Amino acid sequence: MTEATLVDVFTTRHAYVMFVLLASIGLYMMIANQNLVKKLIGLNMFQTGVFLFFVTTAFVQGGSAPVIPPDGSGGPFVSPLPHVIVLTAIVVGVSLTAVGLALIIRLYTEYGTLRADSLREVMQNE
Amino acid sequence: MSDVVLPLLVALPIMISVLPLIFGLKYENAGWPIAMGGSLTVLALAVYTITEVAANGRLIHALGNYPQPYGIELVGDELSTLIVLLIGLVSVLVLVYSRTRGPYGNAFHSGYLLLTGGLLGVVLTGDLFNLFVFLEITGLVTYALVASDRSGKSAYAALKYVFLGTIGASLYLIGVGYLYVATGTLNMRDLQGAIETVGYTDPLIQAAFGFILVGFALKVALFPLHTWQPDAYAYAPDSVSAYISALVSTAAAYALIRISFDVFTVEFFLVNDLISTAIMAAASVSIVVGSLLALMQTEIKRMFAYSSVAQFGMIVAAIAVANETAVFGAIIHLFGHGLMKAGLFMAAGILAAVYGARTIDEYAGLANRSPFTAASIAVIGIALIGIPPSIGFLGKWFIGLGAVEAGEWGVAFVIFVSTMLTLAYVFRIIEKLYFDPPGDPHGHGSDHEHEHEHDGAATDGGHELVADTSAVTVGMVVMVVSITIAVVALGFSWELFFDLLAPVLERFFQ
């Protein structure tokens, strides 16, 4: 691969393109949307993009599931380590979502709004 | 077999952290004694580890006996055990403090132990992905603790922290992914050689460092990524502010030092001149803007929070200067800043508990009424400026000296400017405390947002302050005063630090 054109990138590296897209859309959503729940969804999307990146890196052309028979034959295998990493990161992500939602619920019961801009307004007048 | 102490240090607090909740089913006040027991155990283990490491060199423990570099390992060298000692010390001090000051409840004490365990994990791990997990444990518990006084504002501050902290950790994770793609390993010691093989100018390596750096910049709250931090410190309960300001960002900054010099190594900075220049520029902006913002605050806890932005700017600048003296200074400053901020936030918490004083104007004349606490704020403040003898001076001095040695006059100048600005805001506090007559604050017409007061301590517009001495015990004041004494006494101890850290610095800059 001496000179990769843009088309090449999109056709053979589409998973990486997806990673960038997902992460940027999520990040943008988190910053630009005023609704706290949607911000949290954006955050989740950003993380999902990162997970996709890890899963993609594990892929090996023609690789099978990394279950090695006792005689050590077979292969090539896909790399199991990124899968483990993503599993752990998903767990972390779920707990983060839980904490975030708990805080949002408390904010909602306290101020009766889910919008960040009106929240700031209410808190300034407090 | 002394390396077994490393997994114990991480696992014990995490395992003990479920006990307050379990015993809480039967005994209402089970949390504090258990948390105290856990913290004292951590402190004892920390003292043992640091003596062991100082005598015999670094300890390495392979978890589950998996061979390297496939398994996860815990590494306790002189640098990490120093931070472990800080964690042990501060967690005991803050716990004594929080016994009367709150927050109470078993859930808080469970979180407290979990946070201690998470921080110890961040400091002791030798694996990049494991570091991410511990960063997230630390983050998750911090978010919960910031919101633990159940006010709306603290929930908002915590939510802000959730968003930014998670983005920071995820960016770090992307960086780790890039490194994994480039080298195929996640073990820090293994990566050091692997990165060298791939080449320091490889775009993947450079991008990985960029992501990791920005991730940690969010976690240590460098300007302009600091926006979560003043809110979190200001609206968290006082004990929690003291704890997280002393340790959470410190652990992240420690991890940045560790990754910069143990994984990427100093060669990386030498080869990528542009990267170190960019970090220095960003850190310098952080130092100046952080100090300026601190100067502009009227609320004490916010002022201290912005001051942290400046101090961590110095530490990151020292990383980019990347010579022995500057990094030595950064490590001392990391340790010293943790102690100083713990002391300042605890002292501010005492004054808030007794007089309801949360702004500078409300501090007028309090030195006569609370001489020990006021003197502690004054002395630690002076240490924060960097006036010898104090640990604050040592840190700043060596960072500045390192910058001069490296010919980075810009950084040295910025540290000088920041010292002047720190002088300005610390003396504003000292002037109020000592030289303003009580009950006659200048700007009491300005209605600041000190509306939600804790524990029944009340102010009536800043006129006559109602003292609520039952909110403070002698123990709390003793804790603050002993931190103050330590901050000054450690000012004479640079040789001690140097002897301890010499092997680490030698390894970083062979």
Image: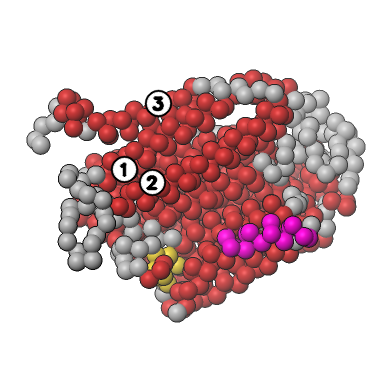
The reply to whether discs 2 and 1 touch (Cβ–Cβ < 8 Å) is: yes
Which residue is under mark 2? A86
The location of residue A32, given as percent across then percent down, is 49, 22
Q: Amino acid at mark 1?
A: Val
Mark 1, other Cα within 10 Å: few <14 / some 14–19 / many ≥20: some
Q: Which mark is residue A25?
A: 3
Q: Earlier in the sequence, mark 3 or mark 1?
A: 3
Q: Specify the quadrant that holds the C terminus of chain B.
A: bottom left
Labelled disc at residue A55: 1
Q: Nearer the viewer, mark 2 or mark 3?
A: 2
What residue lies at 73% left-to-right and 22% top-to-bottom?
Answer: A125
Question: Can you give x and y, in whole percent of width and height, for residue B389 in the image?
Answer: 61, 60
Q: Tell me: residue B354, above or below residue A5.
A: below
Q: Is residue A80 above or below residue B47?
A: above
Kind of element beneath mark 1 = helix
In the image, taking residue B73 as reference, residue A39 lies left or right, namely right
What kind of element bears circle 2?
Answer: helix
The amino acid type, in three-letter code, at marker 3 is Ile
Q: Closer to the observer: label 3 or label 1?
A: 1
